[in-house]
Image: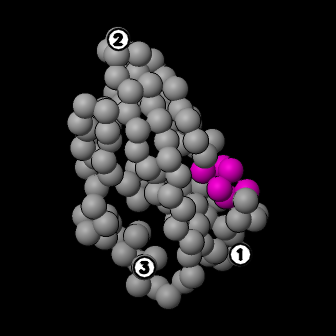
Amino acid sequence: MKTTATDDCDRHYKFNIEFYVFVENGQNIAYCPSLDLSTVGATFNDAVSAFYECFQLYIEACVDSGTLLDDLAAHGWKASRHTLRAPSFTALMKKPELKRLVNSGIGFEKIVAPAQIALA
């Protein structure tokens, strides 16, 4: 997945976006603890597609308002010259939603998707 956005600096970032898909109450849920984003769909593919759209809208809204790097930092992300790094799994396990998912015994699939943001 490639995301392109612009602001007043010339920066390109590559990173992986990780999210989990699981079924709860008959709904497929895609949840990204490192961004506090989640979507729902009738099927696995619906939830994944909705997540990608949600992620794209999140990036666009943050870039349009000039808050992308600040918002990522508020979620625990680290930015270096050309890389964005999500918070560690250990840090994310402090979030009750992820802790509940991992400890619940609910089956889930972890998805890791490469992403690129160009802030030009």
Contact flag, marks 2 and 1 (Cβ < 8 Å)? no
The residue that label 2 is drawn on is: 8
Residue 19 image point, x, y percent: 50, 60
Q: Nearer the viewer, mark 3 or mark 2?
A: 2
- Magenta stretch: give its range: 46-51
The residue that label 1 is drawn on is: 26
- Residue 63 appears anywhere in the view: no
Q: Distance between the Cα atoms at labels 3 and 2?
A: 40 Å
The residue that label 3 is drawn on is: 102
- Identify residue type, mark 1: Gly
- Identify residue type, mark 2: Asp
Q: Nearer the viewer, mark 2 or mark 1?
A: 2
First along the sequence among labels 1 and 3: 1
Q: Distance between the Cα atoms at labels 1 and 3?
A: 18 Å
Does the magenta stretch mainly form a helix, a strand or a loop? helix
Residue occupying image coordinates x 36% and y 75%? 99
Residue 60 image point, x, y percent: 51, 28
In the image, taking residue 20 as reference, residue 9 lies left or right, namely left
- Residue 27 appears anywhere in the view: yes
